[in-house]
Image (tube, rainbow, N blue to C red):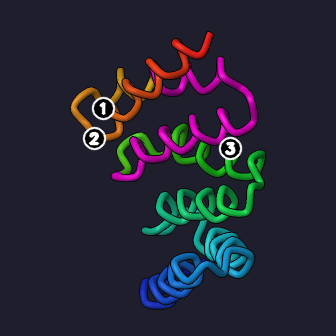
Amino acid sequence: MATNPESEKNAYTSAYLALKSGRYDEASLAFKMLLLSYPQGEYADQAHYWLGESYFAQQKMDDAIEAFNNVANNYPNSAKHPAALLKLASAYQESNRKGDAKAVLQRLIKQHPESNAAEQARSRLKAINTEH
């Protein structure tokens, strides 16, 4: 299928604006449609990330985990990679999966030691470890 960069960008922008306006159902559907139409598109990593954010906002943690995992495992060079790991850890914490959350936070610190996300991960790890 030939890709149309202009339509892909328009679809991404529309989905992103729905998310930022708090229309999470509309946003998650729009990001899913974007990923169906452009699975290897220029915005695929961003679309998976924001899909995760829209699910997270709706408290659909299993779906959020799946979307953030997609970025974490398939887009290691994405600008969204550190943020996806951080949100993945948050989704695991929300799902009472502290062991998974700790593992993801440790991975984030190891893979992106100088990032702002790693700073947050370090303090979250401390918080998780002091809960016991």
Could you say where residue 108 lies in the image, as x and y percent from the top left? 41, 29
Q: Amino acid at mark 2?
A: Asn
Mark closest to the chain's N terminus, 3 or 2: 3
The local crowd at label 3, few if under 14, some if 14 to 19, many if 20 or more residues have their Cα within 10 Å, is many
Q: Amino acid at mark 1?
A: Glu
Along the polypeptide, which appears first: circle 1 or circle 3? 3
Q: Which residue is mark 2?
A: 116
Residue at the disc numbered 1: 119
> Label 1: few (<14), some or many (≥20) within 10 Å?
some
Residue 4: percent from left, percent from top: 48, 86
Circles 1 and 2, Cβ within 8 Å, touching? The answer is: yes
In space, the residues marked 1 and 2 are separated at their CA atoms by 5 Å
Q: Quadrant of the N terminus?
A: bottom right
Q: Residue 37 shows which numbered tag?
A: none
* Mark 2: few/some/many CA within 10 Å (<14, 14-19, 20+): few
Q: Badge 3 is on which residue?
A: 65
Q: Which numbered disc, 1 or 3, marks the residue closer to the eye?
A: 1
Identify the residue at image location x=35%, y=44%.
77
Name the residue located 59 percent from the left edge and 83 percent from the top edge: 18
Q: Residue 106: where, in percent of width, then height?
A: 45, 20
Find the distance from the CA under tag 3 to the CA under tag 2: 21 Å
Name the one closer to the observer, 6 or 52. 52
* Point 68% across, 44% down: residue: 65
Q: In the figure, 81 relative to 25: above or below?
A: above
Residues drawn in magenta? 79-106
